[in-house]
Image (tube, rainbow, N blue to C red):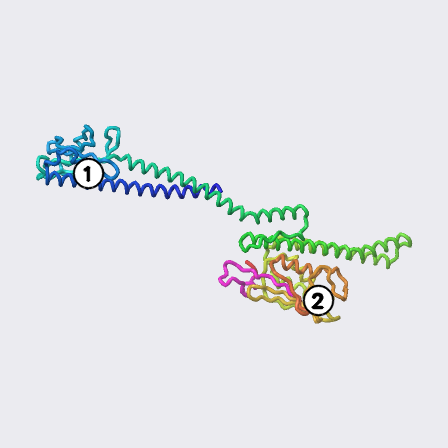
Amino acid sequence: MLAAGAATMIAVVVLGLAIDVLVERHLHGAQDRTLHARAVEVAQLAASAPAVLTTPGSLDSPVGAAQAVVEVVDRRGRIAARSLSLHGRVLPVNLASRAIANGVSGYRTVGFDGDTLRVYSAPLANVAGPVGGGAVIVGVSTADVADTIRSLHLLTILSGLGAAVIGAIAVGLLMRGALRPLSDLAGAAGEIERTGDPRRRLPDPRRSDEVGRLAATLNRMLGSLERSREGERRFLADASHELRTPLTALRGNVEYLARHGASPELIADLQDDADRLARLADDLLAVSREETALPPDTEVRLDEVARRFAADDVDVHAEPAVVLAEDAALERAVSNLVENARRHGPPGGRVTVTVSSDDGRVRLSVEDEGGGPEEPEQAFERFWRGSSRAPGSGLGLAIVRATAERHGGRAGVQGSRFTIELPALRKPSENEGTLSPATLEKGPS
């Protein structure tokens, strides 16, 4: 409001000052033209009827709203006639000296008897009788023009102040209406903060402007937070459920050990339970790490990572490809995919690992000879093992998806083919923006 009021006042004052200057120039110009016209009349009178100049009152005539004063001098500078409005006063003869000496007319502003006069002096022709070769001096007070300019200045200042007040009030009313939805949003956000309930939503201002878009964006953010919290709750519930089974078995075996002593079978069961708990804890830590770790910045040859898994039952077909990645994380993701293919593929079936690149994307695919998951859209969910309830923690594919997303890519499944898609590494020195196979064969520089 203060800024709007100040800006309005400055704009009005600047405009008023510009108008003041124009009006002042116009008034002074009109006054000068009137003085010139009156001097021409006196000169014509001196040339046509010299005797009339000395007639009392013949030189008295108003100039605009003010009474003009006129004085006529001969070539020797002696006063020949003057207007009655001088009331016994005499205009300085030196005002006409230049007109008499050089025949040049001109304007001057002089002080006269406590007043300010605008004076015009002009030479008289030699044929102007006794005053021929002399000069005429015409003057008028500038008080009326000065009063007009002062009134205009005062009007400008008052207009600026009034416009500033009106502008500030108008902006205040407008801003009050514009900020009311923001105030409502702030109040609702404070209530959500107080309750900590992400299921609540901010009020819809029913506007298509920035405030409406802000409310919609914040509500979508709250929806995302709600889904994230629900995901955490499901994760905790699933983790508790998965941990309960091995812990129950472990506790039962320990109780049996305490009552009946150790046996080779019991020792093996205890070892299996401990291994299962360790794998589950390791997988939980891996998922948590992948979801919170920073994006990698190390160049990794994805084809070399794939070739590490070549075995009797695993065929690897990999073309050179370089990505920004964490080698250990990628190796674990590929290991999970290969292990998943071995577990869910037909007994004795082969697993194929393929690395290819196209349009700036690198794809690593692992495919078995089976039919693929029954619910592919849930294959990468935590603790999902399908209807078969195959052994394992159910976190292997979740780790694969988290790893792919941390590396700026994605994971997907089509049939029995599981694929990790990552952005290919682009080097600034390459015009095409991608690595050629020849460059990749030489390895990163």
Q: Which residue is mark 2?
A: 375
Report the front residue among 136 and 14: 136
Specify start and end residues of the magenta stretch as a single range.
419-442
Q: What is the count of numbered marks?
A: 2
Question: What kind of residue is marked 1?
Answer: Gly
At label 1, counting other C-alpha atoms closer than 10 Å, the crowd grade (few under 14, some 14-19, many 20 or more) is some
Q: Is residue 306 visible?
A: no
Q: Is residue 11 in the magenta section?
A: no
Q: Is residue 420 in the magenta section?
A: yes
Relative to residue 61, is residue 283 drawn left or right? right
Residue 439 picture quarter: bottom right
Relative image position of residue 34 (x, y in whole percent): 22, 41
* Residue, far right: 260
Q: Is residue 292 above or below residue 28?
A: below
Relative image position of residue 79 (x, y in whole percent): 13, 31
- Please tell me whether mark 2 or mark 1 is closer to you in this view: 1
Question: What kind of residue is marked 2?
Answer: Glu
Relative image position of residue 192 (x, y in whole percent): 65, 48
